[in-house]
Amino acid sequence: MLEVKNLNVFYGKLQILWDLSINVGDESVGLFGPNGAGKTTLINTILGLVKPVSGEIVLDGESLVKMETDKIIKHGIAIVPQDRELFPFMTVEENLRTGNAYIARARKKYQERLDFVFEIFPVLKERLNQAAGSMSGGQQRMVAIGRALMSDPKVLILDEPSGGLQPSLVTEVFHRLKDLKKSVSVLVTEQNVRQALKAIDRGYILENGKIAMADTADNLAGNDHIRKSYLGI
Amino acid sequence: MINSIVNKFRQRNFVLGFVAVLVIFVLLGIYKPYVLIEGIQRSSLYALIALPMALLLGVVGIINLAHGDFMMLGAYFAYFMNVQLGMDPLVAVVPALIVFFIFGMISYYITFKHVIGAPELNQLLLGFGLSLVLGQAVNIIATNQPRKLSLDYVSSSMKIGDFQFGTYEFIYVAAAILVLVGLQLFLKKTRTGQAALAVGQNPRGAKVVGININWIYLIVFAISVAIIGAIGPIFGTRNTIFPEVGLAYTLKSFALIAVAGIGSLTGVLWVSLILGLSECLVLSSLEYAKWSDIIFFALIIGVIMYRSHQRQVK
């Protein structure tokens, strides 16, 4: 599905990602690491917002490296940004529609996608006419995930989905994530490793722009380094 | 659309404003009917010229200080089409739309494309520079000699009782309504229009839902230039044209949009109405006619002071 091979990314003269390789199949994959490890840079590179100096990003056999962001999204990558990036003056319905309207493949399945989003976040159905900017942080996160799902993605990327949310909502978001991985490949970056490990199949540990460890969620949860550095046990 | 109108009437401020406008209309109609008619015609011209700028500035946030100069070019286009080919200026609106759409695309590629996302000052300086270049280019090609088309139909008039008034200027009213409805339909009903709204509200958000934001900036800029370029011929039928004729309209449009609230197309229509009627009312008095220009600036200063006061209160 999504393969990142030997990626080297620089900001000016500073190298951020070092020969980095990951892959996401029909599964849910976590990307963990401390602040500044390069998680967001990797996501921005996959999305074409940052261009790598060398390396490959391939989705279903097709290279994404030279594509612009809108083309990459049209190819089947969807992102739920850390800051949500909603359209604050549009209603929930209009926000969801923008997630769907510019992807030809998804446009034909508008109602089907909408029903799928309502199935995962029933609360959105009751708030279709509310301006997205007037909703709480947790609800806005749901709209952002819903908007990404409307594009019928092959790979759904969630950047720090628990950021800024109260603990009960974090549990809720990861609960939904478990449902999602049945129908779409998921790549999630997260600092809340304890919660995320319950919702994913495999995980990568990113440190100083390099993959420090890659294993299944169960093995990572049992690893001493992870327990000490990320789970505080 | 009907729903949104019904919803508007549910808002107390809108109803109050609507009633106030109706009362002013009735009082003016009885007291000085020519002020009412001329005021509506003048307002429509202001709104007509400001609407394409409202699309560009209010929806996608591009400040185009060469706005009025594109109208000036449109007026010269119609003038020369008339003199050289005998084409009626109102017919020239159609080719002007196409020519200026393409010209808008080229202008965007050469100029504004490079300042998208940069601080507003860059856009202001670029627009100002473009305005000078366009004005001077016309100056070199067509000289600064004022030009006016002689058309019979522009002096058509109507008489009701003792009251006689020009009817041709109602073309501004029709054109303003047409442009407003057209732009509203474009923004509400088309995918490109919705994308333009999305880009205006959050360019990064628009990018991550698969919108080609460079294309949207280009298209909206080209539409704005096409409309203002096509307004040029209508403007040129009634007014004398010269290379700097657009400058005053750029400033008025900019101020109108600032008063109406950035992003509000219908607001532009209302503010134009207040401005046009007030100007005509002052002009109708022999004693105070020369004060009419001050009305405009007094209104802007008043609204900006009120808004900043409101912000401080909040």
Image: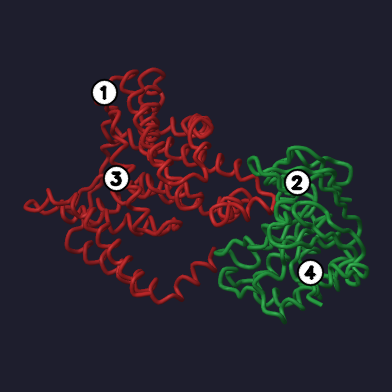
Chain colours: A green, B red
Q: Tell which tag, 2 or 4, sits nearer the viewer.
A: 4
Q: Which of marks 3 and 1 is nearer the N terminus?
A: 1
Q: Distance between the residues labelled 2 and 4?
A: 35 Å
Q: Where residue B213 sits in the image (x, y, percent)?
A: 61, 45
| Residue B34 visible in the picture | no
SS state under label 2: helix
Disc 3 residue crowd, few under 14, some 14–19, many 20+, Cα 10 Å: some
Q: What residue lies at 91% left-to-right and 55% top-to-bottom?
A: A25
Q: Name the residue under label 3.
A: B167
Disc 4 versus disc 3: nearer the observer = 4
Residue picked out by circle 4? A229
Label 1 marks which chain's residue? B
- Mark 1 and mark 4 residues within 8 Å of each other at the beta carbon: no
Please give the chain letter of the residue carrying mark 2.
A
Secondary element at image label 4: helix
Disc 1 and disc 2 in contact, CB within 8 angstroms:
no
Question: Where does label 1 land, which residue?
Answer: B144
Question: Label 2, on which residue?
Answer: A72
- Chain letter for the residue marked with disc 3 in the picture: B
When the figure is inspected, residue B190 is found, relative to residue B104, above or below; the finding is below
Spatial CA span between label 4 and label 3: 81 Å
Question: Tag 3's secondary structure?
Answer: loop
Task: Note whether B209 is above or below B224 in the view shown.
Answer: below
Looking at the rendered structure, the kind of residue marked 3 is Thr
Is disc 1 placed on a helix, strand or loop?
loop
